[in-house]
């Protein structure tokens, strides 16, 4: 049975102190004096803010669990669940629940992105429901924010924290009115060190390991993602100083989000795109279509002029050849406009000696205000090439490419 959702949908418009006080008040009004509440803590900024608000509102009646789904990333080679375990070791009512095998059993081998997301969500619900019973919680909370609701309602992606089925009688969602930049402001106010952390999806690396997953492909993804995150962070810190990862640059967090996606490396040349490129005078650029599909989003104008978003699920195109940044920007927009391909990748490094690796890694690094629109960041080719070389040295990846597609028509994540 789906628990009744009680959402605090207030936007952060005025003073942040007033917002925090009202959110706490909202929680206290909606939680009975004896009730126990369960909250899954991913370690990201949204769930951390929810945990912070609930702790202030109801103290020890909040039970925090971190589910180790097996799809957590590594940071400098250390598995994230280990880092979280360490960070919260002194918090009462906090537990790390290792459910790797259960998630692997249910998710490995699924090809379709939405099916994978749904299987992940069901497993997540099953684990939480087990814990709800154990703790005797009558209420749950989670870090659903406004874009999660909008994108699920628009059928773009099934977010793992919208319409969740928990065996409690109420689901209290205190930050459902906020966009990401507002959540960060509240997090800073609550004194959370993760306030400027880049977003990380609930289903973790399962939506970045594109198509069917097995242990080997996931291992490659985890290593490639770690190398990519560290490299891009260092590059932007060298430009804007260390603070850029904690303080907004020109109003935004730059880089907003950066990671790697792992694809199978099977691909075929696409004659119709080849002809299109030739017409533009790009005779030595070769377009390949990848076997795996990715999720995208299309904006459609309704009769009343309102813009509606629709989900796209299509194959990415890989471009191989010599292109400058102006042309890359143009092709990232034009190819999806003219063909049924919602993503464009540009090859930046391939395995020397013609040894073909099993995987293609796409690097995604975007600038965005609220995750509803995003632009690929411009990073010099020399930097991307050396990142590609690092990835190939440490993995079975054969090709490294840079994702040059904005959102829309691509989403930020791959699935
Ligand atoms: P997309 O990929 O739809 O993502 O452009 C927009 C923002 O949401 C994050 N994201 C998720 N966050 N659960 C989450 O908590 C999810 O299932 C999920 N999927 C995407 C994504 O990383 C980006 O910041």
Image: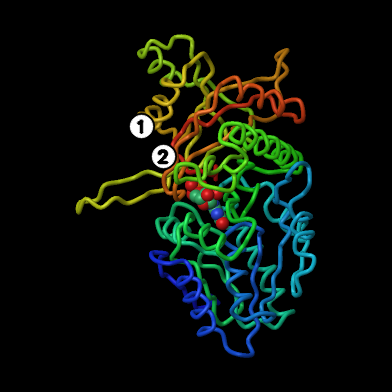
Q: Can residue 391 be seen at all in this image of the molecule?
A: yes
Q: Residues within 10 Å of mark 2 (few under 14, many from 20)?
A: many
Quarter of the rendering occupied by the C terminus: top right
The answer to which of 1 and 23 lies nearer the viewer is 23
Q: Dot 1: what SS? A: helix
Q: Looking at the rendering, which quadrant does residue 276 occupy? A: top left
Q: Position of 308 compared to 184: left or right?
A: left
The picture places residue 192, in percent across and down from the top left corner, at 63, 61
The answer to which of 155 and 143 lies nearer the viewer is 143
The residue to which callout 1 is attached is 337
Q: Residue furthest left?
A: 304
* Residue drawn at the location 60% of the way across and 61% of the way down: 121
Q: Is mark 1 within 8 Å of ligand 1?
A: no
* Residue drawn at the location 56% of the way across and 84% of the way down: 31
Quarter of the rendering occupied by the N terminus: bottom right
Q: Dot 2: what SS? A: loop
Q: Position of 74 compared to 161: left or right?
A: right
Q: Where is 303 relative to 66, above or below?
A: above
Q: CA distance from mark 2 to mark 1?
A: 8 Å
Q: Where is 87 relative to 350, above or below?
A: below
State the mark number for residue 271: none
Q: Residues within 10 Å of mark 1 (few under 14, many from 20)?
A: few
The picture places residue 156, in percent across and down from the top left corner, at 44, 52
Label 2 vs 1, first from the N-terminus: 1
The residue to which callout 2 is attached is 409
The picture places residue 252, in percent across and down from the top left corner, at 47, 45
């Amino acid at each position: 049975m789906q628990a009744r959702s009680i959402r605090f949908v207030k936007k952060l418009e005025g003073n942040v102190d007033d917002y925090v006080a009202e959110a706490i008040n909202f929680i206290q009004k909606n939680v009975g004096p004896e009730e126990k509440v369960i909250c899954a803590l991913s370690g990201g900024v949204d769930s951390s803010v929810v945990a912070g608000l609930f702790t202030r509102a109801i103290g020890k009646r909040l039970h925090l669990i971190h589910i180790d789904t097996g799809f957590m990333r590594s940071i400098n080679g250390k598995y994230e669940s280990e880092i979280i375990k360490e960070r919260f070791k002194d918090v009462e009512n906090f537990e790390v629940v290792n459910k790797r095998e259960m998630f692997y059993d249910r998710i490995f081998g699924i090809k379709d992105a939405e099916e994978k997301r749904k299987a992940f969500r069901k497993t997540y619900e099953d684990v939480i429901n087990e814990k709800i019973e154990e703790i005797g919680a009558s209420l749950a909370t989670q870090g659903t924010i406004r874009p999660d609701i909008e994108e699920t309602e628009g059928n773009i992606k099934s977010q793992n924290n919208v319409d969740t089925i928990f065996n409690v009688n109420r689901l209290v969602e205190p930050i459902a009115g906020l966009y990401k930049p507002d959540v960060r402001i509240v997090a800073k106010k609550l004194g959370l060190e993760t306030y400027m952390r880049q977003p990380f999806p609930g289903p973790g690396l399962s939506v970045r390991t594109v198509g069917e997953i097995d242990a080997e492909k996931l291992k490659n993804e985890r290593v490639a993602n770690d190398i990519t995150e560290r490299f891009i962070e260092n590059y932007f810190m060298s430009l804007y100083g260390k603070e850029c990862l904690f303080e907004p640059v020109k109003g935004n967090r730059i880089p907003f989000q950066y990671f790697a996606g792992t694809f199978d490396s099977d691909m075929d040349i696409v004659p119709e795109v080849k002809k299109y490129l030739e017409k533009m005078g790009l005779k030595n650029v070769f377009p390949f279509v990848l076997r795996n599909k990715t999720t995208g989003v299309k904006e459609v104008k309704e009769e009343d002029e309102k813009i509606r978003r629709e989900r796209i699920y299509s194959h990415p195109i890989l471009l191989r050849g010599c292109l400058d940044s102006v042309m890359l920007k143009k092709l990232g927009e034009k190819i999806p406009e003219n063909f049924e391909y919602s993503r464009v990748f540009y090859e930046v490094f391939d395995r020397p000696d013609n040894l073909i690796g099993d995987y293609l890694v796409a690097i995604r690094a975007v600038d965005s205000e609220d995750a509803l629109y995003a632009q690929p960041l411009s990073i010099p080719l020399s930097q991307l090439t050396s990142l590609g070389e690092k990835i190939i040295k440490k993995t079975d990846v054969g090709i490294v490419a840079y994702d040059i597609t904005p959102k829309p028509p691509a989403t930020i994540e791959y699935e």
